[in-house]
Image (spheres, rainbow, N blue to C red):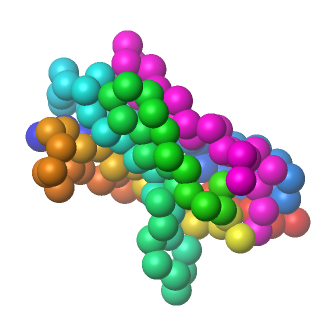
Amino acid sequence: QEQVVESGGGLVQPGGSLNLSCVVSGTIRFPFAVIGWHRQAPGKEREMVAVMNSAGNTVYGDFVNGRFFMSRDNTKNTVYLQMNNLQPEDTAVYSCHYRFPRNTPGSWGQGTQVTVSS
């Protein structure tokens, strides 16, 4: 069973940036997987931030508006989420989801807290 571990969250002022990392261990199939970033704020539904397939094609949530960029490094079994121009409404727990093969539940990480505040 693969393990998914996020890191890189923290406290940032409005307009600031963070780079989140997601390391997936316990699998040699990382290059073929669909990996996504999702977030959930207290009292709100979980929403998709960014999802990337094995070809590197990425879909972003409607709220991103060009501020975030997802990338992957298959030599490190790691994906990243570069977040720029963060706003208070971006405050949430950001979780990484690994899925291979397709049409399986996949695995979730524990999440990393992102707090945007003055």
Q: Is residue 30 visible?
A: no
Frontmost residue, 115 versus 60: 60
Q: Residue at x 52, y 86 (%)?
A: 43
Residue 118 percent across, percent down from the top left: 87, 66
Tell whether position 61 is magenta: no
Q: In which quarter of the image is residue 68?
A: top right
Q: Which residue is drawn at 34% across and 49% down?
A: 97
Q: Quadrant of residue 70?
A: top right
Frontmost residue, 55 versus 35: 55
Q: Is 37 drawn above or below residue 76 in the view shown?
A: below
Q: Which residue is drawn at 18% across and 30% down?
A: 26
Q: Is 45 drawn above or below residue 35 in the view shown?
A: below
Frontmost residue, 54 versus 40: 54
Q: Is residue 118 left or right of residue 42?
A: right
Residue 106 percent across, percent down from the top left: 20, 50
Q: Give the range drawn in magenta.
A: 65-88
Residue 103 percent across, percent down from the top left: 15, 51
Tell whether position 84 is magenta: yes
